[in-house]
Amino acid sequence: MFIFPALHISAANYGEKNAVKKDSTWSNKGLFSFSMGQTSFTNWAPGGDNNVNFSSILIYDLNYKKGIINWKNHFDLEYGSQVFWSKKPRKTNDKIYLTSKLGYRASKNWNYSLYWSLTSQFSNGYKYPNDSVPISRFMAPGYLMLGVGMDYKPFKNLSVLLSPFTNKITVVNDATLADKGSYGVEPAVKDSAGNIIKPGQTFKSEPGGFVKIFFKHDFTKDFKVSTRLELFSSYKQIPVNVDMRWNVLSIYRITKALAVTFSLDVVYDNDAIIKEDINGDGIEEEVGPRTQVKESLGIGLSLKW
């Protein structure tokens, strides 16, 4: 058996600003990381699957500020996979998260804000070991948020967005998933023979209230942590059924060429119904929404951008 250590490359010192020279009103900062590993087995008695695995993260901020106007754009893209010799690849990480916030200064610490975001994934998702029936696709689901409100910034590293007028649109751009009523859309209407009379809806619109809290802190010049919490309450449902997304990103630079990156995502969506085979009869029953957790850890080479 041969095991090659994972290689992790990080480009850009996330948290350090790079001014765009052509226009001093623009600034940007970012992080790119890539890790890769390989495992091979030859006559290995306990068994194992030969595979190559990789994971990548791209985080980029592009901001504009001039006078009483500010515009902040955030891109968070992640993808990872295991590629096996004897079976289909398995996705290990997949995220598209884009946001944009336009602000107009109201006072020293308050801005009027127009906010939008998009959350989805790049490729099909499966409930392994079943890798033939996708349970998610690109924009299935996809979540669009558009809202207006006030942004409170008491100091540089803390921002609280309060948006009582927000519209959340859930997109299920897949007929099979839409007909099942996946991710909270209206399912297909069928006759007694199981034939579809009316196809399932591919999107759902919900007005509601939205709160987003962002905080970052540099514990030292080499150790930086940022966290983002998003809460949405639909006016069409019970107010206490709050959808939640929480992200934590920490970067610890060991040397100029070596860094540790840790990312944590916690999601609770009242419309994301989990199915499990409770009775062991091969039939999955709905067990309701559950807290979803994803984390990734990488260590290796680091390149500043």
Image: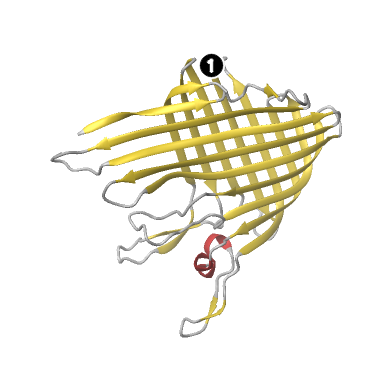
Identity of the residue furthest to the front in this view = 22
Please give the name of the residue rendered at 86% of the width and 34% of the height, measured from the top-left corner.
Answer: 106
Specify the quadrant that holds the C terminus.
top right
Q: Quadrant of residue 96?
A: top right
- Depicted 239 relative to depicted 17: above or below: below
Q: Quadrant of residue 173?
A: bottom right
Percent coordinates x, y for residue 193 in the rendering:
46, 85
Identify residue for label 1: 222
Residues 282 and 258: in front is: 258
User: Left or right: where does residue 253 sit relative to residue 160?
Assistant: left
Please give the name of the residue rendered at 42% of the width and 32% of the height, measured from the top-left corner.
Answer: 35
- Depicted 217 relative to depicted 88: above or below: above
Identity of the residue furthest to the bottom in this view = 192
Please give the name of the residue rendered at 40% of the width and 62% of the height, measured from the top-left corner.
Answer: 133
Residues 223 and 39: in front is: 39
- Depicted 84 relative to depicted 152: above or below: below
Percent coordinates x, y for residue 17 in the rendering:
66, 22
Residues 16 and 266: in front is: 16
Specify the quadrant that holds the N terminus.
top left
Percent coordinates x, y for residue 90 in the rendering:
37, 48
Q: Tag 1: residue type?
A: Asp
Percent coordinates x, y for residue 5 in the rendering:
32, 28
